[in-house]
Image: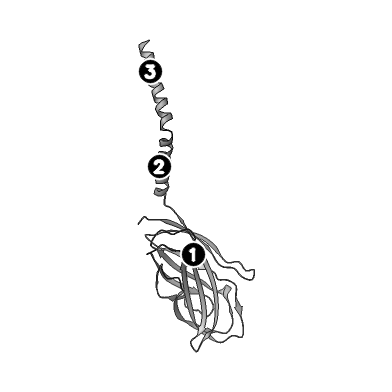
């Protein structure tokens, strides 16, 4: 399968007039790309239940058939987290055929009783095998909850628009193809010009 270099335009979802962070990074299918400090849409709450657990979820759409997605080094920073470098989560391995949310969970370092999503950021490394179709997207979500009350949650989301850009060799192949098409279309004219020059050269020699 051809190696594709993809540009990820990272646009965090916005809500209530608050604008998320926007980043652009490059990605090669043979490796992985690190996405750092992604923000979430705006959400806040006070006088809430004491939440003690965090869930990070990802969902992908319009990915290459038969491809796979590996999401590693998932790290969350923000409220309820005191560990240096943030709270880390296990690796996620996702089939491109999976359209539902895939999640990993960890206990918070300390219980929270008020929350603003603007204080939270998530980072992870993403690797995708296969050429990205136009319109590929990834969505990420943060959920705070407690195991005693699983239906009482706080959540915030963000999204990534994935835009594939061919590597330089692909551009060269395309240019060569266009040049060949042009030369094929102009072959009669080129033959006539070549014939006229040969005739002129022959006439000059006879003189």
Q: Nearer the viewer, residue 52 or 164?
A: 164
Label 2: element kind = helix
Label 3: element kind = helix
How many badges with numbers are in the image? 3
Q: Is residue 15 left or right of residue 165?
A: right
Gap in Å between the C-alphas at discs 1 and 3?
63 Å
Residue 137, numbered circle: 1
Residue at image position (41%, 32%) is 187
> Are the two marked residues, 1 and 2, in contact with CB atoms closer than 8 angstroms?
no
Q: Nearer the viewer, residue 66 or 87?
A: 66
Gap in Å between the C-alphas at discs 3 and 2?
32 Å
> Are the two marked residues, 1 and 3, in contact with CB atoms closer than 8 angstroms?
no
Q: Quadrant of residue 202?
A: top left
The quarter in which the N terminus is drawn is bottom left
Residue 18, percent from left and from top: 62, 69
Q: Is 184 drawn above or below residue 5 in the view shown?
A: above
Closer to the N terminus: mark 3 or mark 2?
2
Q: Quadrant of residue 64?
A: bottom left
Residue bearing mark 3: 201
Residue 128, percent from left and from top: 40, 63
Residue at image position (39%, 14%) is 204
Residue 194, numbered circle: none
Closer to the N terminus: mark 1 or mark 2?
1
The quarter in which the C terminus is drawn is top left
Closer to the N terminus: mark 1 or mark 3?
1
Residue bearing mark 2: 176
């Amino acid at each position: 399968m051809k190696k594709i270099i993809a540009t990820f335009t990272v646009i965090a979802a916005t809500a209530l007039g608050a604008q998320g962070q926007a980043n652009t990074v490059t990605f090669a299918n043979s490796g992985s790309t690190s996405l750092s400090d992604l923000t979430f849409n705006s959400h806040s709450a006070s006088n809430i239940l004491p939440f003690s657990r965090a869930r990070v979820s990802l969902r992908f759409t319009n990915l290459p058939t038969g491809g796979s997605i590996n999401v590693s080094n998932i790290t969350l920073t923000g409220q309820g987290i005191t560990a240096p470098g943030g709270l880390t989560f296990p690796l996620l391995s996702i089939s491109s055929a999976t359209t539902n949310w895939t999640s990993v969970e960890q206990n918070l370092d300390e219980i929270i009783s008020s929350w603003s999503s603007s204080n939270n950021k998530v980072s992870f490394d993403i690797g995708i095998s296969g050429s990205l179709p136009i319109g590929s997207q990834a969505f990420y979500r943060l959920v705070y909850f407690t195991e005693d009350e699983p239906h009482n949650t706080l959540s915030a989301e963000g999204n990534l628009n994935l835009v594939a850009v061919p590597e330089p060799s692909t551009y060269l192949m395309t240019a060569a193809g266009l040049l060949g098409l042009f030369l094929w279309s102009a072959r009669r004219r080129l033959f006539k010009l070549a014939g006229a020059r040969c005739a002129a050269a022959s006439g000059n020699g006879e003189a």
